[in-house]
């Protein structure tokens, strides 16, 4: 029986990467984050793991190892998504700076990599970070890890190409100490890239908003209960995967809108938004997607921490006159229905907006572990062949 792999999740937030680890068969020993309210959801859903409320920019890696009770070289996988807000698209380009203190947590993550010496590393960040400032941060990450004996692969992936019903591009850095280069995981769902390549198999279509949420009950704004029964049986394989045999669903409560907010959404059809508002309901300004309503067929835009507010993006339900519930947001982020979020409505929105989609994390981690096992087998086979050849030569 294969020994299960062990991982630690730094800057874990509510636990998006940790869910992917668990689904990929990896044991999560601990999660650490400075945001106590975000960490509460991690602790609630990973009761056997250590939930560490820490400032990772000041705690030494050796102190962390003592808390987790591990030594250097023992960990199979160190993962994390250190905040890198200075690269965010929400920050105007003129205000983005190479030495922005908001970006320094990337260096803190690398400090932990250098001391913990895990066998494999997975680091996630905003897509803009990979090529920003003439790839200065990417080069720093790769250089520091290579100096520690790691082979590094970097990439930008779109979650929609891996079965997540959301257009969310993120940068990933994969590294290992075995001396081989990780291959980029092949997309599992249809994309423009796939349409231009000759694959032997027809890929699944992208998962749409309605594919993700159509089995959840209709609600009026302000309605919902702590535990809710499903509206229908699972309508597709995505919903089956999200349910994990759950009989009830949590966090399906619709935020009560202000009268003017409700009136604005009521005046719009699915697919419409700010520019389609009647003159008397127009706002003085706002995001291009403000007050936008999703359509059933579309892939959702990138979920943000402001998903609770209709004026911050296209968060209107495609059928009901309301914004998305946190369970619907969780479905769009690919969190299973068994994962219950704790905290206020706005706190849950922050947790989900900052999370890595678990399904994307699962696909990457499964790809990493399978490539490692394949490399080990090929190396062992080569060694046996070499040994056998040497004996024959002596004979």
Image: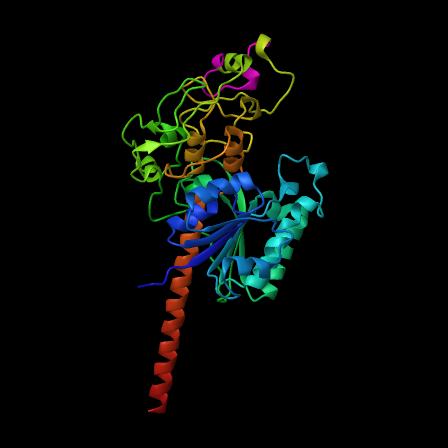
Which residue appears at 42% of the width and 43% of the height?
45
Image quadrant holding the C terminus, namely bottom left
Which residue appears at 60% of the width and 57% of the height?
110
Decide: is 255 above or below 244.
above
Q: Can I make out residue 196 in this image?
A: no
Residue at the far bottom: name it: 395
107 displayed left or right of 154: right
Decide: is 18 above or below 314.
below
> Most prominent secondary structure in the magenta stretch?
loop
Colour scheme of the rendered structure = rainbow
Residue situated in front as seen by the camera: 199 or 205: 205
Residue situated in front as seen by the camera: 52 or 315: 52
- Dividing the picture into quadrants, the one containing residue 144 is bottom right
Q: Can I make out residue 342 in this image?
A: yes
Residue 363 screen position, x and y as percent: 41, 49
The span shown in magenta is 266-279
Which residue appears at 53% of the width and 14% of the height?
264
Residue 245 is a magenta residue: no
Residue 364 screen position, x and y as percent: 44, 51
318 displayed left or right of 173: left
Residue 97 screen position, x and y as percent: 71, 44
- Dividing the picture into quadrants, the one containing residue 239 is top left
Decide: is 360 above or below 112.
above
Residue 293 screen position, x and y as percent: 48, 21
Residue situated in front as seen by the camera: 348 or 155: 348
Residue 268 is a magenta residue: yes
Which residue appears at 40% of the width and 32% of the height?
208
Image quadrant holding the N terminus, namely bottom left
Decide: is 374 above or below 96.
below
């Amino acid at each position: 029986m294969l020994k299960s792999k062990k991982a630690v999740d730094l800057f874990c937030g509510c636990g998006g990467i940790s869910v992917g680890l668990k689904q990929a068969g990896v044991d999560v020993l601990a999660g650490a984050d400075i945001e106590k309210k975000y960490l509460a959801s991690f602790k609630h859903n990973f009761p056997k793991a250590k939930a560490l409320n820490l400032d990772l920019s000041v705690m030494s890696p050796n102190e962390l190892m003592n808390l987790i009770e591990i030594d250097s070289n023992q960990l199979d996988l160190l993962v994390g998504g250190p905040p890198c807000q200075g690269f965010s698209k929400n920050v105007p380009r003129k205000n983005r700076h190479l030495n922005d203190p908001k970006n320094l947590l990337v260096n803190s993550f690398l400090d932990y990599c250098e001391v913990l010496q895990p066998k494999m590393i997975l680091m996630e960040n905003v897509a803009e970070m990979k090529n920003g400032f003439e790839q200065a941060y990417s080069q720093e990450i790769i250089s520091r890890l290579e100096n520690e004996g790691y082979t590094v692969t970097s990439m930008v992936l779109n979650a929609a190409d891996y079965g997540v019903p959301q257009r969310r591009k993120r940068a990933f850095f994969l590294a290992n100490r075995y001396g081989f280069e990780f291959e980029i995981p092949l997309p599992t769902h249809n994309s423009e890239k796939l349409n231009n390549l000759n694959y032997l198999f027809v890929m699944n279509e992208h998962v749409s908003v309605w594919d993700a949420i159509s089995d959840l009950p209709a609600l009026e704004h302000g309605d919902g209960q702590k535990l809710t029964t499903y509206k229908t049986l699972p309508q597709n394989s995505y919903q089956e995967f999200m349910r994990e045999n759950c009989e009830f669903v949590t966090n399906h409560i619709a935020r009560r809108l202000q009268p003017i907010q409700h009136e604005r959404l009521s005046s719009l059809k699915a697919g419409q938004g700010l520019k389609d508002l009647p003159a008397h309901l127009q706002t003085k300004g706002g995001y291009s997607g403000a007050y936008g309503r999703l359509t059933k067929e579309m892939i959702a835009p990138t979920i943000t921490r402001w998903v609770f507010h209709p004026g911050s993006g296209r968060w209107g339900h495609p059928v009901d006159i309301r914004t998305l519930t946190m369970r619907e947001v969780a479905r769009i982020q690919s969190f299973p229905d068994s994962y219950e979020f704790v905290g206020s409505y706005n706190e849950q929105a922050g947790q989900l907006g900052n999370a890595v989609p678990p399904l994307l994390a699962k696909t990457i981690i499964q790809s990493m572990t399978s490539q490692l096992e394949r490399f080990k087998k090929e190396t062992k086979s080569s060694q046996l062949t070499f040994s056998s050849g040497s004996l024959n030569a002596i004979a």
